[in-house]
């Protein structure tokens, strides 16, 4: 009886192990604001979309990090390759988690990138 209970507990432990394949869940864009619309919310948001597009286009975190560092308002960037996202801190203080955006556009195609924000 104890041996059977031990085998059942071992089987339950093996079945309950989580799958750590996060890419489909994190990079799914269904239900989110479309990238071009989100880019119109502000200059930092436009740069976040541009970084996400470069990350989705290349599929490599290091090329997206290099692109982000070429933008003027990115202060710090950390790549989480296990989680398939980038954490970016902008000079304004805004911090964003950026997932790959695969919509067939380059980062430079994002409206608002490369131009200074309008001063009020």
Image (cartoon, grey):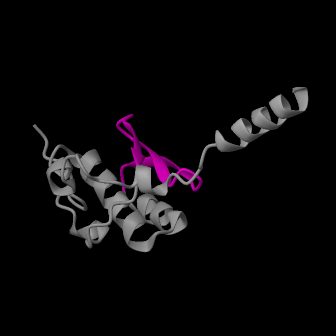
**Residue in view at x 37 percent, y 59 percent:** 51
Q: Position of residue 105 (x, y in %)?
A: 25, 71
**Residue in view at x 87 percent, y 27 percent:** 1
Q: Residue furthest left?
A: 120
Task: State which quarter of the image contains the C terminus.
Answer: top left
Q: Nearer the viewer, residue 92 or 49?
A: 49
Q: Position of residue 21 (x, y in %)?
A: 55, 54
Q: Position of residue 64 (x, y in %)?
A: 45, 64
Q: Nearer the viewer, residue 21 or 106?
A: 21
Q: Which residues are magenta?
A: 72-98
Q: Nearer the viewer, residue 49 or 112?
A: 49
Is the stretch drawn in magenta largely helix, strand or loop?
A: strand
Determine whether, in the image, residue 64 is placed left or right of residue 33.
Answer: right
- Establish if 95 lies above or below 109: above
**Residue in view at x 42 percent, y 50 percent:** 25
Q: Position of residue 113 (x, y in %)?
A: 24, 59
User: Is residue 1 covered in magenta?
Assistant: no
Determine whether, in the image, residue 83 is placed left or right of residue 50.
Answer: right
Determine whether, in the image, residue 118 is placed left or right of residue 45.
Answer: left
């Amino acid at each position: 009886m104890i041996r059977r209970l031990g085998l059942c507990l071992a089987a339950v432990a093996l079945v309950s192990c989580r799958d750590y394949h996060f890419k489909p869940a994190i990079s799914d864009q269904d239900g989110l604001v479309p990238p071009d619309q989100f880019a119109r919310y502000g200059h930092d948001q436009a740069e976040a979309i541009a970084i996400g597009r470069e990350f989705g286009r290349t599929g490599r975190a290091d090329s997206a990090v290099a692109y982000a560092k070429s933008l003027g308002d990115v202060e710090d960037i950390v790549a989480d390759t296990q989680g398939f996202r980038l954490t970016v801190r902008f000079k304004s203080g805004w911090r964003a988690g950026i997932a790959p955006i695969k919509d067939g556009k380059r980062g430079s195609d994002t409206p608002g990138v490369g131009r200074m924000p309008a001063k009020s």
